[in-house]
Amino acid sequence: MAISRRHFFFGSLLAGAVPTGGFGSTPSLKMMGYKSPNEKLNIASIGSGGKASSDIRACAATENIVALCDVDDRQAAAIFKQFDKPPKYKDFRKMLDKEGSGIDAMIVTIPDFMHATAAIHAMERGKHVYVQKPLVHTIYEARQIVEAANKYRVATQMGNQGYSNEGTRQCAEMIWNGDIGGVTEVHAWTDRPIWPQGLTEIPAPTPVPDTLDWDLWLGHAAARPFTSGGDSYAKTHRNFYQPFNWRGFYDFGCGALGDMACHILGAPNMALKLSQRPPTSVECVMKEGASPFMYPTKSIIRYDFPALGSMPPVKLFWHDGLKEPPKIQGVPDGEMLGDIRRVRPGGGRGQGRGQGQGMAAAPAPGSGQPVTASVMPTAIQGEVYDPSQHYEIGENDGSVFLGDKGIITTGTYGANTRLLPVEKMKDYHFPPELLTRSPGHYRDWIRAAKGGDPACSNFNVASPFVEWMLLGVIALRVEGKIEYDPAKMRITNNNDANKYIRPFMRKGWTLA
């Protein structure tokens, strides 16, 4: 077999980045009992309302939905109505016990703190699992969930769609091509939280709604009274803890990091192979709105990663609670646009595979802000620019890579990857493709569950990524810098911080 000059030059860099079987560490998932690609999987879901509804509908496009579970009938009402024939449960353990023989695969889309428990219960019964980001709530669970996946030889995928995005792969290939030289600094940012954080008082208890099983919702978390937050609170946020506000609580979620970091930091993790060089230290260098039981309203977290081969050490800064991208020395002001989208006739929005080119300076980002012809790329998201159409700046999330020879920026899911200043994109040609392209995030997992290559964000990939990300969640809860020994799974300079490595388990609950 002929070996190209590119392969010879990049061989050591790509070692371990693209295993022979795809992005997973196992060469193949083909084994007895896997379905033919033409057969439909029988899929059940733990969680049916909120984000779970879109996960269910995405899988239902090609597969069978055979059982549904949700602790809140009100939250799940729309999906229960749409899929009226499958049996419904509130306790996923009972669903697995009764329906298990007819289930091939499981979606897990519930609050973060219950992800590992639900997924491991499913995997030990031989079910393939798709688990929403941030995969787990604690570092210990990240280790346990990947151990279970490998033990029971099931197909897995974390729900961080950015890992399937074309732009994420282009970003990695541009950096590996040397387009911006050695990357020494990365900034990633989000407008989250868009739910309450930084509160300092818990409202008085109120009656539990008839539609909600509060004890099951709490799962293995410490028991506490239910509260709606009162009438004035409910007008703005529904209930104090749920259906979505749990993200801001230490006991239930991972804050803005848990919501968006697995998306936005996907490109840095892949391009700079950060999972292969865990950070030497992590520190929350700024926070506003501190709380005894919730994440702060705004923060900046610094991760320091050591050198890896020819890649220099990297400083990575996570910014949350922003209304616009951070101001970064050396980065052209106003050119980190985040996501750009075309507004289709009738108000629908389109988003495709391609990338923008030839972009000029742009207005400050903001949701729904129009982008004029003078600042539009000649091609954006796979569409040739049409001056008769309307374009907007979408979500204010993204990342920027600072190299010793240039700068790259991306949007939320690795979309709109481009060099800065954007004039450099005018005659730019993306490097030849070194990475395989995803057929779509759900399709990737479904294909793996039928015996195909491991999905791009299978747990062998996702778990080490999430492990270093979760160090930032711990850093939000302690003062000063933390230093971590991954071999011992221990924070070495702050013994008190180690209590956040493992989950709290209420009596009657276990991970497996």
Image (cartoon, grey):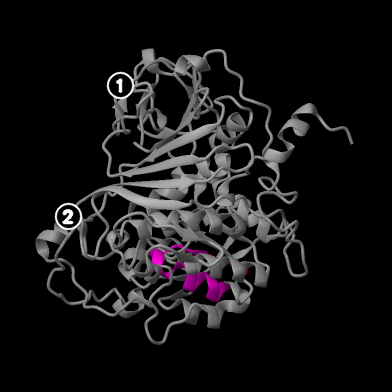
**Mark 1 highlights which residue?**
363
Find the distance from the CA under tag 2 to the CA under tag 1: 31 Å
The magenta region covers 104-122
357 left or right of 151 in image: left
Q: Secondary structure at mark 1?
A: loop
Q: Amino acid at mark 2?
A: Thr
405 left or right of 239 in image: right
**Is 102 within the magenta?**
no
Q: Secondary structure at mark 2?
A: helix
The answer to which of 43 and 501 lies nearer the viewer is 501
**Mark 2 highlights which residue?**
236
**How busy is the neighbourhood of tag 2: few (under 14 within 10 Å), some, or many (20 plus)?**
few
User: Which image quadrant for residue 233?
Assistant: bottom left
Q: Residue furthest bottom?
A: 508
Residue at x 25% of width, y 76% of height: 210
First of labels 2, 1 by sequence position: 2
The answer to which of 465 and 23 lies nearer the viewer is 465
Residue at x 84% of width, y 33% of height: 3
Q: Amino acid at mark 1?
A: Pro
User: Which image quadrant for residue 212?
Assistant: bottom left
Give the vertical position of 243 relative to 265 (above or below): below
Give the vertical position of 308 relative to 424 (above or below): below
The answer to which of 257 and 82 lies nearer the viewer is 257
**Is 110 within the magenta?**
yes
Quarter of the image that includes the N terminus: top right
Image coordinates for residue 222, horizontal then vertical, percent: 31, 78
